[in-house]
């Protein structure tokens, strides 16, 4: 899956780089790590068109793609040992992690209780497509206080545009069934929405659907950036182009801006959007809580079903393999120079264009996996989404300062809604007084009819898609056979 694991409500502390202890080869010693464990590897019951992670099956062709009980025990023990703080997050992802069956996760809970240090607590999360959830799963999640992230790309037409079964059937109905079961059992959950070339044109429809129909109070918007070669073939970290399914840079910026403008007028304090929360923290001078917006990274790793550890969930690639936990202890692997350098490279490889940027403090170049275009003066390493993020962070600057000012004064951040809506009313009155052919009172220099009085502002230029997406083709013989068996059964 190209998705992050369920977001925690309390971000991990920023890593403290200090001399390593217990190993002469340690380059650093972070107090905690966040591992996305993939007990089924890349195996999933869906074949979402944009999901680059399905192609990772090629790394382990012929494998069973199931984490053994022995490895599960080793992983939980080593994850605990890698924490110098009393809170440990155990995060499951895929592929589709529910394919492991519920008993696997019951054993995980037993192992956490068996190996826990005195005073240690665990926070369990799972990112799922939601299609296989039932009452038993949800009762288990509720009993053990899981935070469950469920993937929904918007209303049916937008969700099913790419999120389909291997046989081509849309997944919307089963996802919504899974969501309602989570709600029925009172399971803490959030919604992860991947923003792509199609739903990126419908920010209000997506946001209002999630807020009003889904009923979620926590949203993540993750941009789909699928790297391909010059021929349009998937090339992952080696691609220098974005696929036709990828969200455009300016499109993503507009998507975030449109949702922010609705949120900042109506929903501050009642709906939590991960990107907005991270931005607010950066405006306050705090760690953002999102690795992509931090200056450096290196504490968010990916664990494959066989114990292979990779530098990051987005870098499950032979060039970023850092060890296997059956051969070396996880803490020793993470403390090595390879992982330290990986995290520092997020800062040290920034082009000068980024170093001079006025919103660098909020962006920090975003994720290195997306840095594959050139700056205006030809320097490599610029983020593909740069134009969008720059537009978004500049747009939110004043509202962020208003919220930060209120919080520092001991008041509620939500008072920004009164300020912004009051300004809207004043602007509307000025627009009526000026008329369509007068200068827009916003100060843009444009006539009203070409600025704030423009007809159809924010309305998509085309209707929502009515067709289902194309399943991503399998890349291994096992996958091809599985797809053939499922095609007529879904």
Image (cartoon, rainbow, N blue to C red):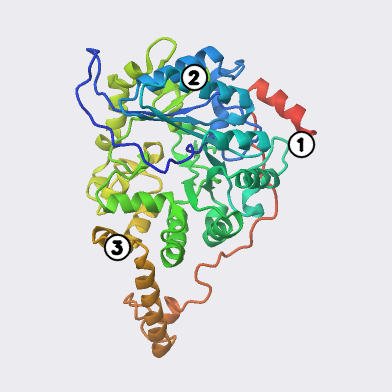
Pick whichever of labels 3 and 1 is earlier in the sequence: 3
Q: Closer to the camera, 229 or 205?
A: 205
What mark, if any, has residue 490 been given in the picture?
A: 1
- Which residue matches tag 3? 411
Image spot of residue 64 (x, y percent): 62, 16
Q: Is residue 304 above or below residue 441?
A: above
Residue that appears at 28% across and 25% down:
340
- Which residue matches tag 2? 111
Pick whichever of labels 2 and 1 is earlier in the sequence: 2
Residue 376 visible in rendering = no
From mark 3 to mark 1, how far is it between C-alphas? Answer: 53 Å
From mark 2 to mark 1, how far is it between C-alphas? Answer: 36 Å
Image spot of residue 150 (x, y percent): 57, 42
For the N terminus, the image quarter is top right
Q: Closer to the camera, 413 or 44?
A: 413
Q: Please tell me whether mark 2 sits on a helix, a strand or a loop.
A: helix
Q: Which of marks 3 and 1 is in front?
A: 3
Crowding at dot 1, Cα within 10 Å, few <14 / some 14-19 / many 20+, comes out as few
Image spot of residue 463 (x, y percent): 64, 62
Q: Please tell me whether mark 3 sits on a helix, a strand or a loop.
A: loop
- Mark 2–mark 3 contact, CB under 8 Å? no
């Amino acid at each position: 899956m190209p998705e992050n694991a369920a977001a925690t409500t309390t971000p991990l502390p920023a890593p403290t780089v200090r001399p390593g202890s217990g190993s002469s080869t340690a380059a650093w010693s972070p107090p905690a790590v966040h591992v996305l464990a993939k007990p089924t590897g890349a195996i999933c019951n869906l074949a979402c068109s944009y999901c680059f992670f399905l192609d990772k099956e090629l790394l382990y062709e012929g494998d069973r793609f199931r984490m053994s009980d022995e490895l599960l025990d080793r992983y939980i023990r080593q994850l605990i040992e890698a924490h110098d703080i009393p809170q440990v997050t155990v995060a499951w992802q895929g592929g589709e992690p529910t394919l492991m069956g519920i008993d696997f996760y019951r054993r995980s809970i037993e192992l956490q209780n068996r190996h826990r240090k005195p005073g240690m607590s665990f926070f369990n999360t799972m990112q799922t497509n939601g299609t296989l959830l039932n009452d038993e799963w949800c009762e288990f999640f509720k009993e053990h206080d899981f935070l469950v992230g469920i993937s929904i790309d918007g209303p049916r037409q937008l969700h099913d545009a790419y999120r389909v079964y291997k046989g081509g059937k849309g997944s919307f109905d089963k996802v919504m069934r899974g969501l309602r079961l989570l709600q029925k059992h009172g399971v803490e959950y959030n919604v992860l929405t991947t923003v792509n070339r199609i739903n990126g044109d419908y920010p209000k429809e997506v946001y209002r659907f999630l807020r009003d129909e889904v009923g979620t109070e926590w949203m993540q918007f993750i941009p789909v950036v699928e790297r391909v070669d010059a021929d349009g073939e998937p090339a992952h970290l080696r691609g220098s182009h974005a696929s036709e399914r990828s969200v455009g840079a300016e499109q993503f910026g507009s998507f975030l801006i449109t949702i922010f403008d609705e949120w900042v007028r109506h929903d501050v304090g009642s709906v939590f959007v991960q990107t907005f929360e991270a931005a607010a923290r950066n405006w306050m001078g705090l760690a953002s809580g999102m690795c992509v917006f931090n200056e450096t990274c290196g504490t968010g790793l990916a664990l494959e079903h066989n114990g292979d550890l990779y530098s990051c969930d987005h870098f499950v690639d032979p060039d970023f393999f850092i060890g296997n936990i059956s051969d070396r202890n996880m803490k020793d692997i993470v403390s090595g120079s390879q992982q330290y350098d990986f995290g520092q490279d997020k800062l040290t490889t920034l082009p000068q264009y980024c170093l001079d940027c006025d919103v660098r403090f909020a962006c920090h170049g975003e994720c290195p996996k997306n840095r594959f275009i050139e700056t205006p003066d030809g320097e490599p390493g610029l983020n593909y989404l740069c134009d969008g993020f720059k537009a978004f962070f500049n747009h939110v600057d004043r509202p962020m300062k208003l919220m930060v000012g209120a919080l520092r004064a001991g008041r509620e951040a939500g008072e920004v809604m009164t300020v912004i809506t009051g300004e809207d009313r004043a602007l509307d009155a000025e627009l009526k007084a000026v008329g369509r052919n007068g200068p827009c009172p916003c100060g843009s220099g444009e006539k009203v009819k070409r600025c704030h009085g423009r007809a159809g502002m924010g309305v998509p230029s085309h209707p929502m898609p009515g067709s289902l997406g194309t399943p991503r083709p399998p890349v291994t013989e096992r996958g091809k056979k599985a797809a053939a068996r499922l095609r007529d059964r879904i």
